[in-house]
Image (cartoon, helix red, strand yellow):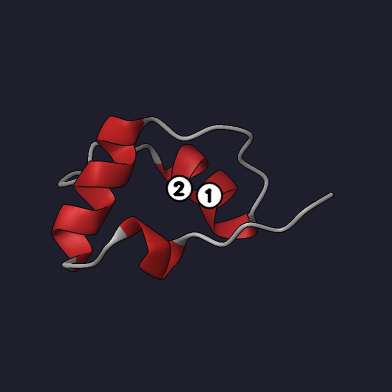
Amino acid sequence: MERVGITPANLSILKTGKAKALRFSTLEAICKELGCQPGDILEYVPD
């Protein structure tokens, strides 16, 4: 969390799929840390 710059509460929101938005800088930091692409961790689910 420290290396990405995200709080535990916000990480929990992301993990549960309840996030309504995600900053590109956060997405970039997560992908950099995990060595992946955004499409590896994101999924589009229509309402």
Residue 1 visible in the displayed image: no
Badge 2 element? helix
Mark 2 residue type: Leu
- The answer to whether 16 is drawn above or below residue 23 in the figure is below
User: Which quarter of the figure has residue 26?
Assistant: top left
User: Which quarter of the figure has residue 5?
Assistant: top left
Residue 29 percent coordinates (x, y): 21, 45
- Which residue does the image show at 16% across and 67% down from the upper left? 35
Whether pointer 1 and pointer 2 mark residues with C-beta atoms closer than 8 Å, the reply is yes
Badge 1 element? helix
- The answer to whether 36 is drawn above or below residue 5 in the figure is below
Residue 28 percent coordinates (x, y): 23, 44
Left-right relation of 41 to 37:
right
Front residue of 19/24: it is 24
- Which residue does the image show at 57% across and 62% down from the upper left? 43
Q: Which mark is residue 14?
A: 1
- Which residue does the image show at 54% across and 58% down from the upper left? 15
CA distance for labels 1 and 2: 5 Å
Residue 22 visible in the displayed image: yes
- Which residue does the image show at 63% across and 57% down from the upper left? 44
Task: Kindly identify which residue carries mark 2.
Answer: 11
User: Which quarter of the figure has residue 39?
Assistant: bottom left
Q: Which mark is residue 35?
A: none
All told, the count of numbered labels is 2
Left-right relation of 4 to 41:
left
Left-right relation of 4 to 14:
left
Residue 30 percent coordinates (x, y): 26, 52
Mark 1 residue type: Leu
